[in-house]
Image: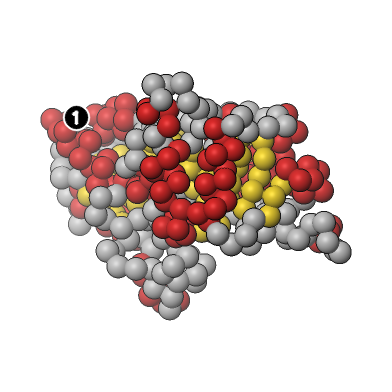
Amino acid sequence: MARKITYQQAVNEALAQEMARDETVIVMGEDVAGGSGADGEMDAWGGPLGITKGLYSQFGDRVMDTPITESAFIGAAVGAATAGLRPVAELMFVDFMGVCFDQMFNQAAKFRYMFGGKAETPVVVRTMYGAGLRAAAQHSQCLYSIFTHIPGLKVVTPSTPYDAKGLLIQSIRDNDPVIFFEHKTLYTLEGDVPEEAYTIPFGEANVTREGSDVTIVTLGRMVHVAHEAADALSSDGISCEVVDLRTTSPMDTDTIIESVENTGRLVVLDESHPRCSIASDVSALVSQEAFDSLKAPIRMVTAPHVPVPFADNLEDLYIPDAAQLQQAVRTVMGKD
């Protein structure tokens, strides 16, 4: 049975249901217990945005506050995964990956390969990303392309509460390391989510809007920007198909190619920087595999190649918006 809950609640519910189902699932990170166990336990916050609020009162010491040392607790989570647990570690902001990247890309990502497929590392690293909350250059980046580049890591970028719950449950049950990206501006987004547990397979993009003129490939928060632009373009008689990648590793290349073969045009919308990005990766894929189907050059709509600004007006200019996407679509349609 489905009911409307927020993206934040969907993530919390996925964690709670998996912890209740499987006692090997643990949660660890900075302030994830929120001070529970001290006076005021019921008011414990549960992480900087309250995502893990209430889990300590249900699962006790399986929810572990850690010191402010990402290298230590991400390393501990990777080690725990090799020893039979299923840790979900919260890297508070993806911008902090530099402190603990070795543990993820040089250790967790390599174990299955190095040990001939015999080693499993079922660890999930949940992390916040994205601009829009005036968190400045060190707390607002979109770094999923860096993790996508690393063989052995699975990378998940849900855009809705429904996808957040289903993909997080799939991530926890998966036997490989998963980096789970949650856009901080989506936490209050509401959507229909079933009460029961369910999974969404990795590597299956979601065509969230069918169309015949232009394919828009995007992910995360930008899915909603794509729909805003598509609604406006429909009044001009332009039919946009929107493909939500859901996961960037594995990536559903078949759905991308099939859509472009049907529409003949591609615009890729990506909040990250333009160089070595998901936008450039998808553009290269289509250029190589579906060039003969293209009726116009591919366009990319991305953030500029600069750090995320703190000033309100500059951050608003930094984030790709519906107006920029509409212009790109009109360009590939020859109507600019």
Quadrant where the image shows the N terminus? top right
Let me know if residue 146 appears in the view.
yes
Quadrant where the image shows the C terminus? bottom left
Looking at the picture, how far across and down is residue 100, in whole percent? Answer: 46, 53
Looking at the picture, how far across and down is residue 146, in whole percent? Answer: 35, 49
Horizontal side, residue 116 vs residue 77: left or right: left
Horizontal side, residue 65 vs residue 42: left or right: left
Q: Which of 207 and 308 is in front in this view?
A: 308
Identify which residue is drawn at 29% across, 64% down: 304
Looking at the picture, how far across and down is residue 216, in whole percent? Answer: 33, 43
Identify which residue is drawn at 38% across, 39% down: 248
Q: Which of 162 and 139 is in front in this view?
A: 139
Q: In which quarter of the image is residue 272?
A: bottom left
According to the image, label 1 marks what residue?
289
Horizontal side, residue 20 vs residue 71: left or right: right
Identify which residue is drawn at 45% across, 58% down: 99
Q: Nearer the viewer, residue 263 or 88?
A: 88
Let me know if residue 207 appears in the view.
no
Residue type marked 1:
Glu
Tell how many labels: 1
Looking at the picture, how far across and down is residue 64, in whole percent? Answer: 69, 50
